[in-house]
Image (cartoon, rainbow, N blue to C red):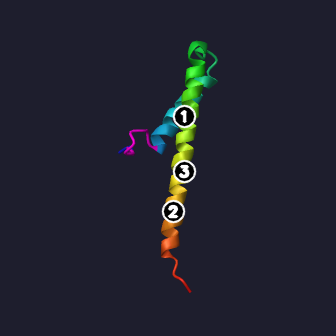
Amino acid sequence: MAEQPVDGAPGYTEAMVELEGILAELEREDVDVDHLAERVARAAELIELCRSRIDAARIDVDRIVGSLETPE
């Protein structure tokens, strides 16, 4: 089942799939120039979303690992 974050935005995996689709569109020789800027803008949004999700996961992992460490 696809991840569904509470904020309504696509999850990381879903965003990556959409981003890969946009990249495939942009690599085609018959790319629709009328929609080019729109697709690039959407790709930028998805990249930012993925970076945000990675940063949040890193913070969570650091917090969890930190809680497992015992003071000496």
Q: Is residue 34 magenta?
A: no
Q: Is residue 64 above or below residue 27?
A: below
Q: Which of disc 1 and disc 3 is earlier in sequence?
A: 1
Residue found at x 60% / y 17%: 31
Q: Write down the region rendered in magenta.
A: 3-11
Amino acid carrying mark 2 in the image: Val
Asked if marks 3 and 1 touch (Cβ < 8 Å), the reply is: no
Dividing the picture into quarters, in which one does residue 6 lie? Answer: top left
Q: CA distance from mark 3 to mark 2?
A: 10 Å
Instruction: Kindly state the secondary structure of the residue where label 1 is placed.
Output: helix
Label 3, on which residue? 54
Residue 2 rendering spot, x and y as whole percentages: 38, 43
What residue occupies the far bottom of the structure in this picture? 72
Residue 12 rendering spot, x and y as whole percentages: 48, 44
Label 1, on which residue? 45
Instruction: Kindly state the secondary structure of the residue where label 2 is placed.
Output: helix
Instruction: Kindly state the secondary structure of the residue where label 3 is placed.
Output: helix
Residue found at x 54% / y 65%: 62
Amino acid carrying mark 1 in the image: Glu
Label 2, on which residue? 61
Residue found at x 52% / y 77%: 69
Q: Which of disc 2 and disc 3 is earlier in sequence?
A: 3
